[in-house]
Image: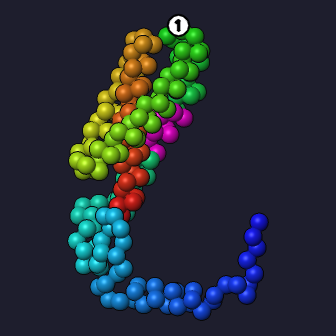
Amino acid sequence: LNIVEVKDIDFEFWNERLEYIRNLLQQKNNTPKIRGRLPYTLKQAKIMQQKYLKNAGLIALITILSMIPPLSTDLYMPALPDMTIYFNTTSTLMSFTMTIFFIFMAIGILILGPMSDKYGRKPVLIASISISLIFSAACAFAPNITLLILARGASAFGAGGMVAISTALIRDS
């Protein structure tokens, strides 16, 4: 383990670096260049603001998109024993629906996240919400365990897209 002594640190060098960064940040209409899709100037930042949602709406959207997938597992868990009786199946098979949910949610994150980068956030987000909503309703009306497992997996795929896009929206804003 190497221990750095205080006399080894070049305080003058770091003070110069800090002053340089402060000067860059204080220049009017000329922020430092940032990699990625973030704005390079204050003028471009004003253009990229949300037209309809504004900041509060964007925060609410991200919050709701981030809440739905955990809620769909937390509200589902207490009903597992009753659902085992209703579908006349084993508790192992009912627990398998949770496993399927997490696997397909991860697949949804991995597939729909890059798709939102390529095709845009809005169409992929609308598709994700639609998939999750339609197949969640299919879960509610599933007549047997097989259809429940299939609908649960498809619903999780859409929920994964919602998680991926909410994370990307945070990065974009």
Q: How many marks?
A: 1
Q: Amino acid at mark 1?
A: Asn
Tell me if residue 152 comes above or below residue 47 in the rendering.
above
Residue 120: x %, y % from top left: 24, 50
The residue nearer to you, when weighing 32 against 103, is: 32
Looking at the figure, which quarter contains the C terminus? bottom left
Residue 61 place in picture, x, y as percent = 37, 53
Q: Which residue in the rendered view is the most extreme toward the top?
A: 88
Q: x%, y% of residue 166?
A: 39, 51
Q: Is residue 95 left or right of residue 30?
A: right
> Where is mark 1, residue-wise?
88
Asked where in the image residue 52 lies, by quadrant, the reply is bottom left
Question: Callout 1: helix, strand or loop?
Answer: loop
Q: Is residue 5 left or right of residue 30?
A: right
**Residue 71 lies in the magenta-colored region:** yes
Q: Position of residue 103 (x, y in %)?
A: 47, 30
